Amino acid sequence: MLKIPHVSVIGAGLAGCEVAFQLANANIPVLLYEMKPHKYSPAHISNNFSELVCSNSLRSNSLNSAIGLLHEELRALGSLCLHSAYTNRVPAGDALAVDRENFSKTITNTIKKHPNITVINEEITQIPMENIVVIATGPLTTEGLSNSIIELIGEKSLNFFDAIAPIVHKDSIDFSKAWWQSRYNKTGNDYINCGLTEEEYNTFYNALITADSIDAKNWEQDIPFFEGCLPIEVMANRGKQTLLFGCMKPVGLLNPHTQEQPFAALQLRQDNNYGTLYNIVGFQTRLKYAEQKKVLRLIPALKNAEFAKLGSIHKNTFINSPRVLNGNLSLKNNSNIFFAGQITGCEGYCESIAMGFLCALFIKQQIFKATFTLPKISALHAILNHVINSENSNFQPSNINFGLFPNLDLSNSVVANSKKIPKKVKREKICELALQNLVILQEDLLNKKLITKQPTT
Ligand SMILES: Cc1cc2nc3c(=O)[nH]c(=O)nc-3n(C[C@H](O)[C@H](O)[C@H](O)COP(=O)(O)OP(=O)(O)OC[C@H]3O[C@@H](n4cnc5c(N)ncnc54)[C@H](O)[C@@H]3O)c2cc1C
């Protein structure tokens, strides 16, 4: 009989519990390290595992949404956290919201009574170097362990800031006002440019400097902003001209719709491999979400912009996964060390659960020498692909969204003759294909004993 070495999982958050449970169910012994209740991060307060530190919602449960698809995939493949979410669901329209206390308790009890899991309440500051190790300590990983990770991956530092500019769905930009051009036509037409007249800039500027920002949490107030990544509203407050010499400078741009240089302009840069999402260059912001939408939609080409993600700046520890991880979430320079959860560069509760689930699947694959392939049209593939294959020079965390899915070839579809295939149709097709793929994946993983049917809690 195969003698299976234990796996050490560090962090009993959403990802750590999912990894531990999935491995333990496959008869792999797990040592699960959690620093609570001896030490708490600034955002954690409960003794239970898998604590939801902020909202109690796992977002939309609609099968027409990317996040709803992720819920369904995780549920169908036997995720412990999703099982607990449905068991402890509270009414919230089409959102999957939970009684947070009972959600965490269900998971904690399941983990603690599992015969293959040993819980050790201890802060890890040095990564254990025996057998397989999973680091799932989340966005608020303690300093000691962060330093140990830095030493191991050989990067100058982990990314300690989530400096995020809003990300826009390309097909919501008005190209009768926007245009493609690189500044001074230097490097092809890679950027989408949105011009403003002086009057439009004045309106935009006044709205920006009077908009409400999110209050920094007490523990965030000590974090210095990097001068190179100041929130746009902070820069704007230095004077009306500042943005015109910074991220809204018009020089080197010519608006083909007016044949003039605009008074001000912002640029959007491709954000994903598929070219469906574009981030607004230099527009990191901590304005309240509703204010961001209001202010940015004052830019004529963005009047109807749809945002895949809004801007934020908060402390976040994540590694540069595309640079340091293999496709199975193990380290390129030590294939026995895996990463799971938000520390890999996904963002959100459900995404972190997904990265825990996938990490366990890859470890089982390694131990049992069984192979599987994630379908390209699936939410699990979409979030994994973001983490592993994004452009690594400015890697930033992301929620799941349709922009992370591949472009569909709908040339044979009934809608192919229409001039432009509506976004809604494309998204419905993605969901339809993903659900078909899920049935095949589920059967394959069950046959190979890489998953069990449903968790019992
Ligand atoms: C302030 C804040 C608010 C957020 N709000 C939301 C929200 O509303 N919705 C949403 O979808 N996402 C939100 N997120 C993102 C959310 O944290 C993650 O999506 C999710 O909790 C991450 O899961 P995880 O398992 O990777 O990490 P966590 O859930 O944070 O779990 C990490 C675990 O590791 C433990 N740990 C840390 N360091 C050590 C160590 N050295 N040794 C041992 N144990 C350790 C921690 O105590 C914790 O239990 C928020 C994040 C933050 C920081």
Image: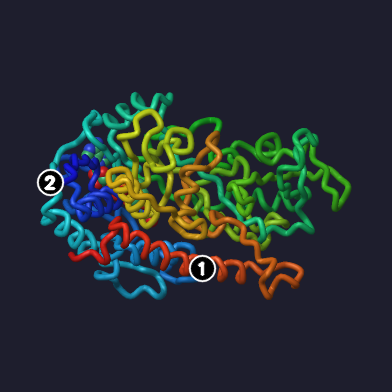
Judging depth in this view, the residue of 336 and 282 nearest the camera is 336
Q: Earlier in the sequence, mark 1 or mark 2?
A: 2
The residue furthest front is 1
Is residue 123 or residue 257 the one in the foreground? 123
Q: What secondary structure is found at the residue carrying circle 1?
A: helix
Instruction: Using residue 29 as the reference point, say whether residue 289 is left or right of it.
Output: right
Residue 118's disc is 2
Above or below: residue 74 compared with residue 356: below
Residue at image position (33%, 30%) is: 149
What is the quadrant of residue 133 in the picture? top left
User: In which quarter of the view is residue 153 placed?
Assistant: top left
Q: In the rendered view, does 90 fall on the left or right side of 310?
A: left
Q: Residues within 10 Å of mark 2 (few under 14, many from 20)?
A: some
Between residues 360 and 87, which one lies in front from this camera angle? 360
Counting from the top left corner in percent of width and height, residue 141 is at 30, 38
- Element class at badge 2: strand
Question: Alpha-carbon distance for marks 1 and 2?
Answer: 39 Å
Return the x and y of residue 406 as percentages of the image width and height: 58, 56
Please report the residue visible at 44 percent of the width from the left and 62 percent of the height from the top.
67
Q: Is residue 248 left or right of residue 55?
A: right
Foreground residue among 429 and 144: 429
Q: Which mark is residue 431?
A: 1
Residue at image position (62%, 61%) is 408
